[in-house]
């Protein structure tokens, strides 16, 4: 809801639990008074305005007739440089006479239904009432305008901010910095949480106290990047998953970005986010406008879980297209780790038959099916089938896969090209590179120049031909290198600073065209795993490959960090082989499933070589996931114990009516003689009774080695043939737990699993986890009198 007090020039934006309050000052600057927990409209604004009432030494007063007012100590919605605010500006504009002096003052406002801008991904109303406050700020010196947009998502407790810059002058101006938002706060001893990493180590949680000066994260890689996700949290030092005050900021953009935090000597904190101003300059001609991407803001005084749930709901309800809102995702099999480039048609069909036997629903053919693509040095860009590998062609192969009983999906990497390809030989001018400088390569690839309309049109056409050629229900859209050699032969010298952003706009046009043309095809985004995991991609592809790292332990860290912004319903999560290719670590098959189940389940290793033990266990895993698929994928998501600072991790999904929940608990290393434990389950209904059942899990006897004599009633030589035969066939069931527990006990006490193994033996009441062990529990509310 949006309220305007005309007498006091106060804007009060309310969501279900938050208030955002602004005031038009006598100077016409727009000031932030408050952002935080919801305030009553009748409370007024007395006590919200924070300012000095006397001239402050060392500052520049804005006007001679009011020596108490200076911009450097003001809380501004659209700060610029040049009139006494010495902090980072939100906008920086070079004018035709060389001046950079601008100021934007309030002129008018309007409250409208949320507008949509075709060129950019953005939050959508999706048949809900979403009001947007548009405040028009003007620079009368230079005839420039900025519309500040505040879209209000009441139920999600989200405000989406963006700026639209218009040149109403008769001169061409140069945008050197055009961020999406600015928020000035009083510093409250805040800490900053960012989600940083690298390839196969994405979105690791990094916390540090915000000290004096500027803290900045960004991407200059042409993608949102695995280095720093375009999402940050500012919180009190004592905030945890359940309690405490925190702000979240998430950018809806896939390219170069920056997030800036500036703590001043006066204990003010400035937060900014938007397109990276590094290597960005944009000529804006008379009557032209520039649209910045949206930033989603939220606040919680109930800890990080509530903050995450605000974003989860906004993504599910207002970013992902409605067709995929609650559409259950299939259990898939991807052939990459089984075959890489080395496959033939018979190999694929053999894998598909085995996948069907396991209960898998979708077969995905990865890289290597097209052109002369037998390794990563050639063929990329030639989107026609390699008939030597697949004599039936894609259409024939898809039919055979369908006859087996599986849907068929395929891998593409349309944004890239190998120099050793027909596409490059025919169109060498279609790549990003300087004509006089030898280009650098990533994965033997160059980047197609998507700022060119003809390249966009070509990709739309050639990919449409692929999708029209067969019964394809899924596309994995990959992108395997970062940007270098930034130069476009289609842009003038004065426009080269536009290239990175124009590339993103071209990509968005391609994706919008294809996903609208093929609304029933499930698109999954991938970029060397999680190198472009952002909300903008989710507008077109409702799920993203979370990481190329499928190690059962590393995935716990990656998915835990990812879940701070992104719901589990967008995270591709596959069970792969052990030891893992990324860490050479051995983890139990059951743990690899348990972490993957808190995402979109898939399998990715050579399933033609499964042992009877592995076959039976995987069949049971898939059946369990299918039984509770809706809850796994769309339940409200909670984190409890944090694997970044403990030996344990707990995840829980609960249905909206709290009648059902699934808990996953994970342990990193087995400790000797460990203590008793309980797990928080405060999110359940205290007025119900729950039947709690552990998921049936199984050990391979190999785990025990010579200790097998203590685990089985018969004595076996652990080096003998009989033991070798049994370990690959016998399902040794872990302890089971079946108990009814009152909801008020679960809410206030927590759930107490059976005691962990302490080194003095095992029986039916001992939970033997072992290194990288895990368990899963299902909670079902009982009906009727209790």
Image (cartoon, rainbow, N blue to C red):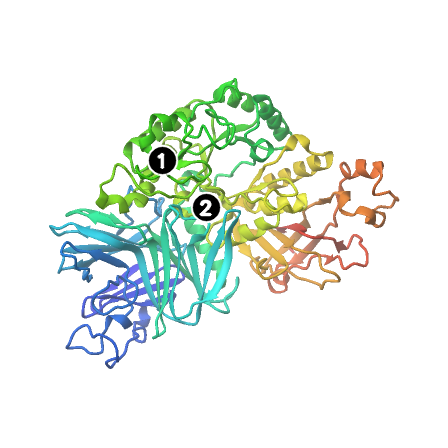
Q: Nearer the viewer, residue 450 or 373?
A: 373
**Residue drawn at (26%, 50%), measured in percent from left and top?**
281
From the image, which quarter does the C terminus lie in? bottom right
Q: Secondary structure at mark 2?
A: loop
Q: Nearer the viewer, residue 502 or 648?
A: 502
In the rendered image, residue 313, in percent from the top left (x then y), is placed at 44, 51
In the rendered image, residue 340, in percent from the top left (x then y), is placed at 56, 32
Query: Is residue 68 positioned above or below 577 on the image?
Result: below
Residue most extreme to the left: 170
Residue most extreme to the top: 391
Q: Secondary structure at mark 1?
A: loop
Q: Nearer the viewer, residue 199 or 316?
A: 199
Q: Residues within 10 Å of mark 1 (few under 14, many from 20)?
A: many
In the drawing, what numbered circle is on residue 531?
A: 2
From the image, which quarter does the N terminus lie in? bottom left
Residue under label 1, please give it: 448
Q: Residues within 10 Å of mark 2 (few under 14, many from 20)?
A: many
Pair 2/1: label in front:
1
In the rendered image, residue 261, in percent from the top left (x then y), is placed at 37, 63
């Amino acid at each position: 809801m949006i309220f305007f007090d005309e007498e006091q020039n106060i804007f009060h934006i309310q969501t279900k639990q938050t208030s955002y309050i602004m005031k038009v000052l006598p100077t016409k600057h727009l000031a932030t008074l408050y952002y935080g927990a919801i305030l009553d409209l009748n409370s007024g604004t007395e006590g919200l305005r924070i300012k000095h009432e006397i001239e402050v030494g060392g500052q520049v007063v804005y006007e001679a007739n009011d020596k108490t007012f200076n911009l450097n100590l003001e809380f501004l919605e659209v700060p610029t440089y040049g009139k006494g605010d010495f902090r980072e500006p939100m906008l920086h504009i070079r004018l035709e006479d060389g001046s950079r002096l601008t100021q934007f003052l309030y002129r008018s406002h309007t409250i409208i239904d949320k507008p949509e801008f075709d060129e950019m991904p953005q939050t959508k109303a999706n048949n809900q009432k979403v009001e947007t406050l548009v405040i028009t700020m003007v620079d009368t010196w230079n005839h420039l305008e900025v519309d500040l947009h505040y879209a209000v998502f009441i139920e999600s407790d989200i405000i989406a901010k963006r700026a639209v810059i218009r040149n109403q002058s008769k001169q061409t101006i140069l945008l050197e910095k055009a961020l999406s938002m600015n928020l000035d706060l009083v510093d409250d001893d805040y800490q900053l949480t960012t989600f940083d990493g690298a390839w196969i180590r994405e979105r690791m949680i990094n916390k540090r106290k915000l000290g004096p000066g500027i803290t900045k994260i960004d991407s200059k890689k042409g993608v949102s990047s695995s280095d720093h996700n375009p999402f940050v949290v500012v919180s009190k030092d004592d905030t945890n998953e359940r309690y405490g005050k925190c702000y979240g900021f998430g950018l809806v953009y896939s390219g170069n970005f920056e997030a800036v935090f500036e703590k001043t000597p006066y204990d003010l904190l400035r937060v900014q986010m938007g397109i990276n101003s590094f290597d960005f300059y944009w000529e804006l001609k008379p009557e032209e406008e520039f649209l910045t991407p949206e930033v989603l803001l939220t606040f919680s005084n109930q800890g990080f879980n509530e903050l995450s749930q605000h974003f989860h709901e906004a993504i599910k309800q207002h970013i992902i297209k409605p067709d995929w809102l609650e559409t259950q995702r299939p259990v898939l099999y991807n052939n990459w780790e089984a075959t890489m480039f080395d496959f033939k048609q018979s190999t694929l069909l053999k894998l598909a038959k085995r996948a069907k036997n396991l209960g898998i629903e979708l077969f995905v053919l990865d890289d290597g099916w097209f052109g002369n693509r037998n390794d990563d040095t050639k063929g990329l860009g030639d989107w026609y089938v390699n008939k030597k590998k697949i004599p039936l062609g894609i259409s024939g192969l898809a039919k055979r896969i369908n006859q087996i009983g599986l849907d068929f999906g395929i891998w593409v990497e349309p944004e890239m090209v190998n120099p050793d390809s027909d596409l490059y030989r025919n169109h060498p001018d279609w790549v990003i590179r300087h004509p006089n400088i030898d280009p650098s390569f990533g994965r033997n690839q160059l980047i197609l120049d998507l700022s060119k309309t003809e390249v966009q049109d070509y990709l739309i056409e050639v990919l449409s031909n692929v999708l029209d050629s067969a019964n394809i229900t899924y596309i994995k859209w990959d992108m395997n290198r970062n940007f270098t050699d930034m130069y476009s032969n289609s842009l003038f010298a004065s426009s080269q600073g536009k290239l990175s952003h124009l590339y993103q706009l071209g990509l968005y046009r391609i994706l919008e065209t294809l996903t609208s043309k093929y609304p029933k095809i499930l698109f999954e985004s991938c970029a060397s795993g999680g190198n472009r995991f952002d909300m903008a991609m989710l507008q077109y592809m409702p799920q993203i490959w979370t990481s190329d790292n499928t190690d059962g332990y590393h995935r716990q860290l990656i998915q835990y960090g990812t879940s701070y912004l992104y719901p589990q319903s967008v995270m591709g999560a596959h069970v792969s082989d052990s030891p893992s290719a990324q860490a050479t670590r051995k983890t139990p098959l059951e743990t690899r499933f348990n972490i993957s189940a808190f995402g979109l389940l898939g399998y990715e290793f050579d399933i033609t070589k499964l042992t009877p033990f592995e076959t039976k266990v995987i069949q049971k895993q898939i059946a369990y996931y299918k039984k509770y698929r809706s809850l796994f994928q769309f339940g409200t998501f909670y984190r409890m114990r944090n694997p970044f600072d403990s030996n344990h991790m707990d995840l829980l999904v609960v249905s909206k009516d709290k009648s059902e929940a699934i808990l996953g608990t994970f342990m990193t290393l087995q400790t000797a003689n460990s203590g008793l434990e309980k797990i928080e389950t405060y999110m359940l209904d205290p007025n119900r009774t729950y039947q709690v059942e552990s998921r049936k899990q199984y050990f391979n006897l190999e785990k025990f080695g010579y200790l097998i004599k203590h685990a089985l009633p018969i004595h076996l030589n652990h080096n003998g043939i009989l033991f070798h035969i049994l370990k690959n066939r016998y399902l040794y069931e872990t302890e089971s737990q079946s108990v009814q527990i009152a909801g008020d006990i679960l809410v206030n006490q927590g759930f107490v699993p059976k005691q962990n193994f302490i080194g003095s033996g095992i029986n039916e009441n001992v939970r033997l986890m072992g290194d990288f062990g895990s368990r899963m529990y299902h909670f079902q509310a009982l009906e009727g009198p209790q």
